[in-house]
Amino acid sequence: MTGNAEVKVRIQDLSKAFHTNGHEIRVLEHIDLDVREGELVCILGPSGCGKSTLLNIVGGFLPASSGDVAIDGLPVRRPDPRRIFVFQERGVFPWLTVEGNIGFGISGLPATERAARIAHYVRLVGLEGFENAYPQELSGGMKQRVEVARALAVNPDVLYLDEPFGALDSITRLVMRSELLRIWQTERKTILFVTHDIEESCQLADRIVVLSARPGSIRRVVEVDLPHPRDLSSPRYLALRDSILEEIGLAHRI
Amino acid sequence: MTDGNRKSEIGNRDEGAPPLPVGPRLVESILLPVGTAAVLIAFWHAAVRLSHTDVFPSPLSVLRGVGELARKGVLARYIADSLLRVGAGYSLALVLGIPLGIALGWYSTAARAVNPVIQLLRPISPLAWIPVAIVLFGVTNVAAIFLIFLASFFTIVVAAMNGVRNVPGMYLAAGRNFGLSVPALFSRVIFPAALPRVLTGLRVALGVAWLVVVAAEMIAVNSGLGYLVIDSRNAGKRYDLVIAAMLLIGLIGLVLNTLVRQVERLRAVRWGFNAP
Amino acid sequence: MARPAPIDSPPPHGRPARSSRSLVRALVPLSGIAVLILVWDVALSLGGGRSQLLPRPFAVVRAIAELAQKGFLLKHVVASLFRVTWGYVAAVIVGIPLGVVLGWYRRGGMAIAPILEILRPISPLAWIPVAILWFGVGDVSAVFIIFLGSLFPLTLTAMNAVRGVEVVHVNAGRNFGLRAPELLRRVIYPAILPQLIVGLRLSLGIAWLVVVAAEMIAVSSGLGFLIIDARNAGNRYDLVVAGMVLIGVIGIALDAIMRSLERSKAVAWGYTTILEGEQPDVAGGDAAGRAAVLP
């Protein structure tokens, strides 16, 4: 990634606290982050560090307690169909078929164009033959593809992925990662990807933002200058992974 | 409790036992209840014979009673009367209850205000409203329809309310993310997501309406299957007709229940019923 | 839009000025009742004709006080509760074991369940003539009708609960060498308990609805009798509505007692999985479970 691409998402001095039963829980503190156009940024942190909350604030689903989030220079106030949030496969609508799900956000298009778009994204995520299947007839990985296709079909500039592969088995997870990279390389979206999986972040990201535990704050930002496809046994990859393991305070040994 | 008998309806059968072929299972599922019914009827017949009762009817005289009612033309008219009352009261409850329930499910403050009222009114047997219904509407069909409306209304409101409340937040977030307006959010996300639960409520409410129409007809009007039960007893202790009416009530109730279950099996709503 | 945008795990938004908010929150449920009473009063003061027979709220309060003074209140309430208790307890003793057996033996369930499904939609009140024939006019008839009213839903709930027990759990139990009685006590019983308790609550509600209706026909005491008697003997509609209010309040109390059972830790696990996330504290959240109800 070239360093001088335009800034797409700008997060400035963002903090978030929740109030429950009279207690204040500080979840995020003083987050500053710029995400460049077309960049794939992984936000990495332990469970409960507030990384999901961060993504929800950036997506416009939750208000920040203080600080600003701007996309293309405009402040984010509410969810926007130009930036789509991909949940774990649980966000697929169970009452719609694969086609119905993928076409959910483009119901305003003329029928022929809509059908063409749906067909395109069905192919892109490799679900040909399952167009009329209902989600409960699909595996977890296939449902996840439906969610990604549903998001891509509206042609958003930004995708938010919140531990999208967390519920999948390890083999499917690997396949889905390379699919995501393939799609990202054809469509060039800006992607914010939340994960607690160090390997995952090292395999995908242009930059890795490591968050500390609650209250979450940025501990370190790691530039990953490894070209795709990444060789998972190369010394550079291993060195990267180990440095992050160390950063988080885990010895590289079981 | 032998191991081989442990079996649930939905495919989770013992690993060890070979699956039963479909044919015999189907035959079994018809033959067994028919056989049991035959045994029960035989037992009933024998009991009436042996006890020499002249009041309680034998199965055969119940059957003759049904024939008699059909010949006189009362049977069809009474069934139609009961069904019409249920149809009117239930439809009214549907038309008013579903929008109210959806609104209450959405606006939680309104729900907190209305909930105690619903909880207070619900345990009052619809039949306890009979005096009030008669004051307001006289001894008419409207009174019976009002009672059926009351009986199904609260169940429907609560079902719709819980249906909307329990729509996973993630579906709402996704809908909003795609830029849906509030009406579109309702028609494209909330309604389909709540549908399975609402349908279950509708089925239950229809059952309730059927129970109540029969009871209301015993008191408040002079036609219908409930009236047939009480009238046959009061006018000449025709217990054959009493039992005939009861069995008809049961059969029609079962048919109504089955019809709504068919709707629940539609592909687009089946997802909510844990079916494979 | 009153509903916040809930996403995944984050707790709800911060609430400023908590004390005044919580006061408002406490008042909201009362406001519903207040509006009901107000509408009732205003509607009757405006309405003409036959509605003039109906009592206004204050008259109902006076009527309840009158009942209490004369000692009728306690007498009727106790009579109704007495019948409910016997009919309901009998239904529990017969229905639950029957349901468990039918759920366990597939063929038994196949043979009997359709017959129960035909008997269930018959209003318990339709049994009144038969009950009177068998047991005469009196408490036994009313108890029998209540018994029938709660028997079918209890049996079917128990049957479906046993059928729904995860095969994995049964297999795990067997794996540890449990014999049938132990399996029943240590696996089946705890597994079906959450559904059973919901079924118990719903059928108690049914029993309460049925007793009131049965008393309107078959006996000469109890809250149902109070209602019909107050109307027939002198159009005392204030007493009619007083009876209705008492029925509602006692119904709520019975429901609340059963609900407190659902909150115990031993069964609370069941209400997320079995009832698909039904919120137990929401408006009688029993649309799914309210199997067969009332007269």
Image (cartoon, rainbow, N blue to C red):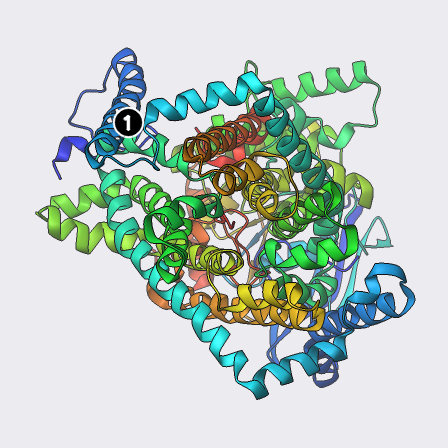
In the rendered image, residue B203, in percent from the top left (x then y), is placed at 56, 38
| Residue C55, quarter of the rendered image | bottom right
Q: Nearer the viewer, residue B8 or A107?
A: B8
Report crowding for label 1: few under 14, some 14 to 19, many 20 or more residues within 10 A (C-alpha): some
What residue is shown with label 1? B41
Identify the secondary structure beneath mark 1.
helix
Circle 1 chain? B
Provide residue B95's location: percent of width, then percent of height.
75, 41
Residue C221 vertical position relative to residue B64 in the rendered view, above or below: below
- The answer to whether residue A226 shows anywhere in this view is no
Number of numbered labels in the structure image: 1
In the drawing, does residue C284 fall left or right of residue B29?
Answer: right
Relative image position of residue C157 (x, y in whole percent): 37, 46
The answer to whether residue C205 is above or below residue B194 is below
Question: What amino acid does circle 1 point to?
Answer: Ile
The C terminus of chain A: image quadrant: bottom left
Kindly identify the residue that appears in the image at 69 percent across and 69 percent down.
C234
Q: Residue at x 27, y 18 (%)?
A: B31
Q: Name the side, left or right, on which A71 lies relative to B47.
A: right
Query: In the rendered image of this protein, does residue C106 appear above or below residue B194?
Result: above
Front one among B50 and A171? B50
Q: Position of residue A99 (x, y in %)?
A: 65, 22
The residue nearer to you, when weighing C183 against B152, is: B152
Q: Which residue is depicted at the point 70% across and 43% down? A: B145
| Residue B259 visible in the current orientation | yes
Image quarter of residue B81? top right
